[in-house]
Amino acid sequence: MCIRDRFTDVEVTSNVVYGSNVTVLPLLQGALPAAQPLVCDIYEPSGDVEADGRLLIFVHTGNFLPQYLNGSAVGTKTDSVAVELCSRYAKMGYVVASIDYRQGWNPTAATQSDRTFQLINAAYRGVQDARTAVRYFRMSEQTMMDPYGIDPSKMGYLGEGTGGYVSYAASTISDYNDIILDDNGLPLAKFWTGTPGAEDYIPMVIEQVNGNPEATSDGFAPAGIFGPDPVQLCIANHVGYSSDVAFQINLGGALGDLNWLDAGDPAMISMQCPADQFPPYSTGVLVVPTTGEN
């Protein structure tokens, strides 16, 4: 692994489409969920004729809301931090893909339980999109004559803020049940809604509705949720390719639950500021920056 610059110039290819999936952002304007392209900017060292195949997938921050609507000036794949980090790593010899991922939840929903439900679903979509990006690059290596010089065994995430949450979850969640059940097979209450033991006690994310965590299966909201007909919420992407990564780097995010962490998970580097008021330095209740709520 190189830690010093090997190249002076970086080539950037913008808005490369790595997949397509359904966004719920139209709901904020009273429209139905709709498909959107998933795009990334790819940074490559200029003049690299001996690529070593390492790929970083950079996942930006932004609270799963569009820039400014999230209460800040950041939240895109072209944030100044994203451009700086991706450029630096490319000069060291890495290929870096700065991905945009689906956003959308309503921070002004009437109750905290409703806001929590929507935010958990937004995070789930972020995990799906991060894993879709991994599979896109595996697919490009196998079927597109390896345009980026990728070694599939040397792929990993670099997540900042919200992207750190995504990278942690995308590299540790093993399957759908890993999200909703603890290691003893009991419900992880923070990812369920309703009253325990009652008919309304259901997971906040349902595989048949939201698709699987890989986004390799379609998902549909039943008739009656958004109108008289079922509405597709997940489109399967790059089926048949692995979503596995070799490592993940977290800059200021948090792990959703310790039950997700298992022996054999990818190597991890995690950095956190002790004074961070949103994800606590040790273990605690997270605060959503957009709303200031737990």
Image: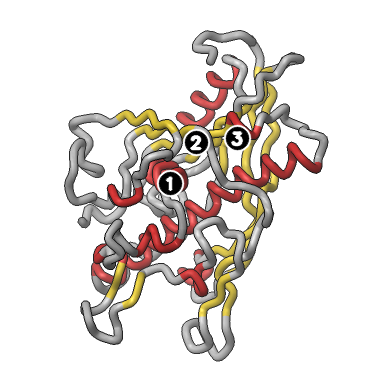
Which dot marks residue 97?
A: 3
Image marks 2 and 3: residues in contact by CB distance under 8 Å: no
Q: Determine crowd level at label 2: few under 14, some 14-19, many 20+ residues with C-alpha closer than 10 A.
A: many
263 or 268: nearer the viewer: 263
Is residue 240 shown to the viewer in this render? yes
Pinpoint residue 235: horizontal percent, then vertical percent.
Answer: 63, 65
> In the displayed structure, would residue 254 be above or below residue 128?
above
Q: Residue at x 70, y 19 (%)?
A: 51
Q: Determine crowd level at label 1: few under 14, some 14-19, many 20+ residues with C-alpha closer than 10 A.
A: many
Is residue 74 shown to the viewer in this render? no
Q: How many marks?
A: 3
If you read the primary sequence from the N terminus, does the residue marked by circle 3 or circle 1 appear first?
Answer: 3
Pinpoint residue 188: horizontal percent, then vertical percent.
Answer: 27, 63
Picture quadrant of residue 192: bottom left
Image marks 3 and 1: residues in contact by CB distance under 8 Å: no
Picture quadrant of residue 7: top right
Which dot marks residue 157?
A: 2
- Name the residue type under label 2: Tyr
- Name the residue type under label 3: Ala
- Name the residue type under label 1: Val
Q: Residue at x 52, y 33 (%)?
A: 246
If you read the primary sequence from the N terminus, does the residue marked by circle 2 or circle 3 appear first?
Answer: 3
116 or 51: nearer the viewer: 51
Distance from disc 3 to disc 1, alpha carbons, whole Å, reads: 15 Å
Image marks 1 and 2: residues in contact by CB distance under 8 Å: yes
- Residue pointed to by mark 1: 166
Horizontal side of 279 relative to 144 (left or right) equals left
